[in-house]
Every structure is written in structure tokens, then in C-alpha cells.
Amino acid sequence: MFGKNHIKWWSVALMLIAMALPFAIRGSASKKEGITQANRVKATYVLMEAQRQHFLEHDDAFYHLIAYAYSLDSTNTSIAFYMGVAKFERTSFEHTDELTAALAQMRKHVEAHPEDKYEASLYAHAAFLVNQYQEGLRVLNIQHQLHPQDDNLLSTMADAYEKTSDYKKALAIYDTLQQWQGQSVELSSAKLKAYQALNDTTGAIHEMRALLASAPTNADYNLAMGKMLFMFGYRDSAMVYYDKAQQYEPDNGLTYLTKAEYYLALGDTLNYDRQTYQALVSTDLDVESKLQILVNYTKTLLSAKDTTHRTDHLFDVLIEQHPLEPQIRVLYSEYLMFIDNNEGAAEQIDYALNLDPTNEELWTRLMAYHLYAGNYEKAIEVGDKAIRLNPDNVELYSYLGSSCYSVKQYDKAIEVYDKALAILDSTQVDDRSNLLSGKADVKFAMGDTIAAFALYDQSLDLNPDNPGTLNNYAYFLALSNRDLDKAERMSAKTIVEDAANPTYLDTYAWVFYMRKEYTMAQLYIEMAINNEEQPTSELFEHYGYILLANGDKQKALEQWRKAIELKPDNEQLVKQIEIISNENGNENEN
């Protein structure tokens, strides 16, 4: 496993080095007693395979192969270099001593063989990652002397000079690149950034004017000029160039997007809305850019309570433009969920899965949507298919087990939880704790309280702070009128962690009710109802029983009637209402 802070640092170097460059397979000329010629040859072949695995990003294979090659011939500087690479990759950034040692091992080969351009660049990038910019630049300057026409190398050096705040050297490199490559927005933007750091407004304006002079009708150049002027506070002048860009390329979505950002900065929401909408429906703006702005734009529409024709039309247009882009469908589903169109949200995820059927996250999302909507049978149908395609996804098993529990398919739920537990390894403590808790819920529903409570104990042994286990265990102990002191301690723990959670507050109230501490029970049940946007039938039912225990029959009846409105098939509660209503009537007559 890589250290938790690591990235594929060497993949950056791969983009900057020509892939046709042959791998350096040279070693030290010195001999070491005990290393046979056969082992030297074998080590060289293993190194070649290790390099191939490295390029393919097969990290474990690379590490084991290079370690084997190093064991065969530690005098080969190429092998030692890649052994350093492997150590560097597997070390987290906080372990500075180990990183320094790995870099030192890499450096030996780079010093001995400066002509090996690929390894030198790899070493320089590693040095940059641990903020050793001067060391990386030293090596890259040597490479520049050997390869003075390499523009990728110069670009890397310019970026490193910026990191060390040596903006003048960075500008000198950008000037050289500009002579080779000609004017471009990318180079001018890089120079503009350096000029800004140097507080050289004149240089910045001169650069952008030179860019625009090279192609006055280029929309991108006009936009760049406008952005620079806006940044320096010349807002009216900036809009002149934005308008020119839109005039030269009226279908360019980037011009609308740039204007939208301009109006947003000015607080002009009306024009921001208009320009953003035009950017999104344009045909030439790339999908990634549209997705980036679509989230904020949708939020704007929702805050304006525009959740009907305009929003739906926008998604229809985008889907028509990009029918094979699943992320648009995913975003549409999130919008539909926000406006409580659960069925529509699930439909959009279905479409996205047709485009990307191996996406595990989409399968879990689809199951979550069906669960949220209470469509448990559909969730089970989806879950069975999802697990066939993703048999090692624990989250899918968890959703499926919960769905089966909800429709009282208890045997299947137990089977699902057991399968999930079987695929977990010993390190997945939290997942195991959650699955044991889910299985305990099922066992309790099946009437096997001994097995249920034993499973809850196992869950808490693994994770003593598991809120779901603590809550359910406490609630079912209260329902069973068993060990109420333990139930109170567990429930209190959940309240400490999440004092506004209606479910936890309801459990705490019910524990107090079973302990006959009715004043405390009423306090917490009222907090639960006040914190729940849409109180459930169960909450109103509990509230009624607690009010009844406190002697308020009339209010108890009011809460129970609310419960029946939400769940008319609660026969036991209907009978309770009849009994208390009759008692109330008799008392009123007297």
C-alpha cells in the first residue's frame, strides 16, 4: 500500500518525457564478490519487466520485481535507482527521513549517468514533491544543457522557478518558449501570472496586447485580454473585449461563461443567469466545463424556486447534446431527488447505468434512492443484479440486507449479511460492526432476542461507538423491558454525539418511558418531533403513550390520531384510541 498522502507522482514525468526514449539498463562497472554473471544478466531482465509494470501502474508487481532484481544485483545503478523509486512511492510524506534516503538512492544513478534523461526527470519530480526545488532544478539544468531544444523540459523548469518565487527566470523561459512556439493563451497566461507576482502591470498589459495583436479577431485572445483588464479593475474595458469575443464567435460557449463570471462578480444575478444558461446550451463548450458550472447554476435556479420548465428543459438540451455522458444523468437525478421526485431520480440513474454498467457507486446510489422512497421490492431487485456484477461490494450487501428486512424477508436478509461478513477481512472492523448490527436487527424481528443481543455485543466489541448499534440495541432492550440501565447508557452516548438526531432522541425518550421516568420521556420525545421535518407515525404513537402516562388523555388522543393518519393499518393503536376515547367520554359525563 502507498502512504496515505501519496499520489502517482511519476505519472507527471511520463507525460513530459518522450515515450520513445529507451530505458537505461546500465549498471556500475564495479564487481562485488558473490554476484555471479548469471545473476547480473537475470537482474537486468527482471528490471526490464519491473519498468514495464511501473509504466502500467501495477504498483505491487513493480515493487516485488524491483526488490527481486535488487537482491540479485545491488551494484547495478539502474536497479538501485528504481529501488529508490519504489521506496519513495510507498512512503507517506510525513516520513521525511525515509523519503530523503530514497532520493539519495535515486541520485547516485542520476549523478553517474546524467545522459539518462528519463531517470533524471523522474528524480527531479520526486525532489519537487518533497519541496526540494533547488535540487530538482539543479538536475533539470544539467538536462537542459544536454537537451537545449526540449520545450517540455523548459516548461517544467519554469514551473519550478515559480514555486521558488524566481519569477524573472520563469519569465525568461516563457520568452524562449514563445519564440519557439509563437503566441498562445497558455503562455501569455503563464507570463501574466509571473508579471502579477512581480507587480509589473505594464509588463502584463504589454504581453496581452502582443497576444491580441497576433490575432485581433481570435475570441480566446479577446477573452484573455478582458479577464486581465477585469483583474486590474478596468471593468468597462473588460466588457468591451468580452463583447468582441462574442461578436467574433457567437456560438462559443466560453464567451457566455466568461461573461457569466463577470456578472456574478458584480452581483448582477439576472445577467449571470442569462449568460450561464446560454453557455450550458451552447454546442461547443466541453462536457467537463458544463458539468462544473451546471451544479452552481442548478443551485441558483433552486434558490429562485425555478424548479419546473426551465430546469427540466436545460437538462433535456444537455442530454440531447451529450447522450452518452452519464454524469449529466447523475446530476439530473440529484436535482430530481432535491425536488422529491424519487421515481424520476431512480430513472435517471438507470439511464446512467446503461451507459456505465460497471459503476459500483451508481448501483449503490440507485439502491439508496429506492430505499429512501420506500420501494423495497425494487431495491431488492436492483440489489440482486448489482451484487451479481459486484460480488465484493460490501455496501451493496448492506443495502440489500436492509431492504429484505424492511419487507420481512428475514431468511434472505440473514443470508445476505452472512455472505457480506464472509468477504470481509480482519481490517474492515467498522464494516463488520455494521453488518453484525444489521443481522442483529433481523434476529430481533424474528423473535430471537438472545441471538440479537449477542450480535449487538459483538458489534460493539468491534466498534464501541457504533451509533446505529448503540441506538438499536438500546431501543430493543427497552421494548423487551430488559437491562434498562444499560439501554439508557447506550442511548445517552448517541445523544452526546448527535443531540439533534430525531431517531436517537426518540429512543432515549422510550427508554425513559420504560423506566417510568415520564417527565424526561416527554422532554425528549418533544425534542425528537421538533427536530424532525416530517414526523413519522411511530413518533406520534410514542408521544401519545408518554402523554397518557403523564395523565393527559386528550393530547394523547390527538397524537395518536396523527399517527393513524400516517399509518391507518395500525390496528392495535386504533383499539387503544377507542378505549381511551370511551374512558374520556365517561369521565366527561361524570
Image: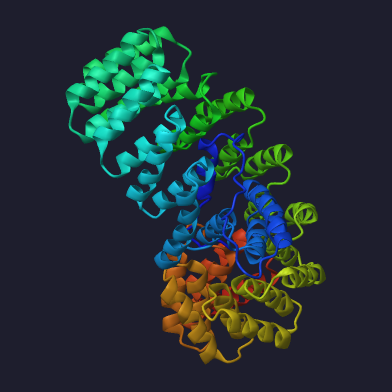
* Residue 567 visible in this rendered orientation of the protein: no
Q: Is residue 237 left or right of residue 448?
A: left
In the rendered image, the vertical position of residue 163 relative to residue 32, given as above or below: above
In the rendered image, the vertical position of residue 75 relative to residue 116, given as above or below: below
Q: Is residue 378 left or right of residue 498?
A: right
In the rendered image, the vertical position of residue 175 relative to residue 453, given as above or below: above
Relative image position of residue 132 (x, y in whole percent):
35, 53
Q: Is residue 230 left or right of residue 383?
A: left
The answer to which image quadrant residue 196 occupies is top left
Relative image position of residue 162 (x, y in whole percent):
30, 39
Relative image position of residue 279 (x, y in whole percent):
46, 22
Residue 187 vs residue 590, the one in the foreground: 187
Residue 89 vs residue 18, the one in the foreground: 18
Residue 565 vs residue 230, the one in the foreground: 230
Q: Which corner quadrant holds the N terminus?
A: bottom right
The answer to which image quadrant residue 241 occupies is top left
Q: What residue do we see at 33% from left, 15% from top?
A: 211
* Residue 426 visible in this rendered orientation of the protein: yes
